[in-house]
Image (cartoon, rainbow, N blue to C red):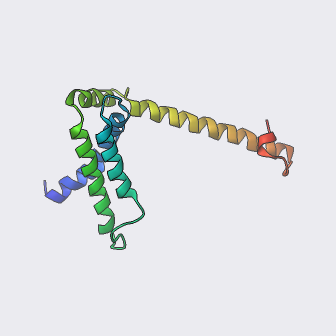
């Protein structure tokens, strides 16, 4: 496989999985604080608005993607292998911290949107444009 295609495959297919694994490892209390701080600082630098020339079309943004991959891979490789394998297994079986937090977030969003819809319908039915949303029950 040509090098550019192999790199594109890594970006498109491997990065989300590595990101989920890194998330699980960051949430794990058994991982020391120093590697967590290092990856957080690296990602902070990457997403910082102060940037090297992003005005260069496409090229400026690929630099950030490459740095994210490097930061995540370095963090994941620094984690103890037993803990890393435990989280990889949980990700495969959809029982990881990532999966649980994702389900909780989606459920909370659905609940919030449902509540908002009920309040808007109630407000429209009553045609009271001056009533506060906090007063609608």
* Residue name at image x 40 percent, y 59 percent: 48
Residue 33 falls in which quadrant of the image?
top left
Query: Among all residues in the image, which is located at the extreme front?
Result: 34
Quadrant of res 87? top left
Question: Residue visible at 24% across and 49% down?
Answer: 10
Dividing the picture into quadrants, the one containing residue 85 is: top left
Q: Residue 93 in the image: x percent, y percent?
A: 33, 26
Nearer to the camera, 57 or 121: 57
Looking at the rendered structure, the number of numbered marks drawn on it comes to 0
Which residue is located at x 23 percent, y 45 percent? 74
User: Residue 116 location, x and y as percent?
Assistant: 69, 41
Residue at x-position 57% and y-position 35%: 108
Q: Would residue 82 appear left or right of 134 to someone viewing this image?
A: left
Question: Residue 124, position in %: x, y?
Answer: 80, 46
**Image height of 83 relative to 117, above or below:** above
Q: Position of residue 43 (x, y in %)?
A: 35, 52
Instruction: Classify residue 69 as left or right of residue 45.
Output: left
Say if 65 sits above or below 76 in the image: below
Seen in the picture, residue 56 relative to 132 is either above or below; the reply is: below
Question: Which quadrant of the rendered structure holds the C terminus?
Answer: top right
């Amino acid at each position: 496989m040509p090098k550019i295609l192999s790199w594109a495959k890594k970006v498109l297919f491997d990065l989300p999985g590595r990101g989920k694994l890194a998330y699980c490892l960051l949430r794990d209390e058994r991982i020391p604080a120093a590697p967590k701080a290092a990856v957080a600082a690296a990602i902070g630098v990457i997403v910082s608005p102060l940037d090297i020339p992003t005005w260069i079309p496409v090229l400026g943004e690929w630099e950030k993607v490459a740095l994210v991959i490097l930061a995540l891979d370095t963090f994941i490789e620094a984690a103890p292998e037993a803990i890393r394998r435990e989280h990889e297994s949980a990700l495969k079986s959809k029982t990881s911290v990532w999966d649980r937090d994702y389900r909780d977030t989606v459920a909370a969003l659905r609940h919030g949107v449902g509540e908002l819809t009920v309040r808007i319908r109630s407000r429209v039915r009553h045609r009271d444009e001056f009533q506060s949303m906090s007063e609608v029950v």
